[in-house]
Image: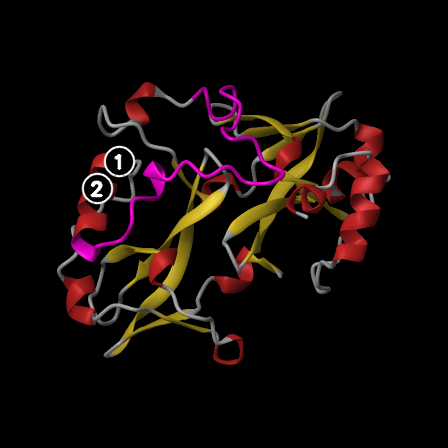
Amino acid sequence: MLRSLAELLGYKLWAKDGHMGEVRDFLFSDEDWKIRYMVVDTGPWILGREVLISLEALGQPVWASKTFPVDLTREQVKTSPDVDLAKPVSRQYEERIHQHYRWPAYWRMNVSLPGYPTHIPPQVFAKQEEEDVESEEETHLRSTKELIDYQVRAVEGKVGNVTEFSVVVEDWQLRYLVLDSSEWLEEDKKILVALAWIGDIDVSTDEVAIDLTQDAVRFSPPFDPTLAVNREYEEVLYDYHGKPKYWQSIE
């Protein structure tokens, strides 16, 4: 089921022995658009500290109470390696935190995903400033908040900005970005853009380039964020743009 990431911000996390914090952000891998960690604010339990929690540690969400059970103790979280989220998260740090919690190392699994490339094209995120790299260890983690408000550029020019992402909660796979084109069209309109249709993300100019024309965006089926995205809507969206359907690869 597809859900809004913004909807999940503020959800409470409960360890085996009590409350441990609230969701503040998500980190995804720019190799496969899969969310790998929640960024959790542990205040007021531990004031001023944020920790990373792997999706491997989450239990079934309790949607009614907006909570995520976590298969950890508060002591495990309290003694976890500190992370400076003002810098990119290095693979070296991931090794440390996975050893601490005894989580499997996802980066060694090399699982390709239906409807996604085995590796995002090298031009995506390729223009990252060298000084942003924390160490020689390669890192592929990005904050979803980092991309909010990025300008979206179609083939001929700008068409709006990124306002949100949709995620499949069952496997934490990001599927769509929400494009707000109201400023460009001078009318309130939002559309979904599949992440497979992104051609380039330029962090030096805060721009996302998509493989769609301005007319394709202008007349794309509108997206209502108050309604659930179902397969019927996805059929209409993909048929309109003439794009291959990811679920057919899965089936």
Q: Residue at x 81, y 56 (%)?
A: 232
Q: Which mark is residue 91?
A: 1
Characterize the local packing of mark 1: few (<14), some (14-19) or many (20 or more) Cα atoms within 10 angstroms. some
- Secondary element type, mark 1: helix
Judged left or right of residue 89, residue 239 is right
Judged left or right of residue 169, residue 36 is left
Give the Cα separation between the discs numbered 1 and 2.
6 Å
Q: Magenta stretch?
A: 100-127
Q: Residue at x 79, y 54 (%)?
A: 233
Q: Does 170 sit above or below residue 59?
A: above
Residue 187 seen by the camera? no
Q: Quadrant of residue 180?
A: top right
Residue 234 seen by the camera? yes
Q: Residue furthest front?
A: 251
Tell me the amino acid under the disc marked 2: Glu
> Is 125 one of the magenta-colored residues?
yes
The x, y position of residue 193, in whole percent, is 69, 41
> Is 37 one of the magenta-colored residues?
no
The x, y position of residue 120, in whole percent, is 52, 28
Of 171 and 216, the residue lying toward us: 171
Q: Residue at x 55, y 63 (%)?
A: 7
Q: Which mark is residue 128?
A: none
SS assignment for the magenta stretch, majority: loop
Colour setup of the view: secondary structure
Of 104 and 197, the residue lying toward us: 104
Q: Does 176 sit above or below residue 155?
A: below
Tell me the amino acid under the disc marked 1: Arg
* Number of marks present in the image shown: 2
CB under 8 Å between callouts 1 and 2?
yes
The x, y position of residue 51, in whole percent, is 26, 56
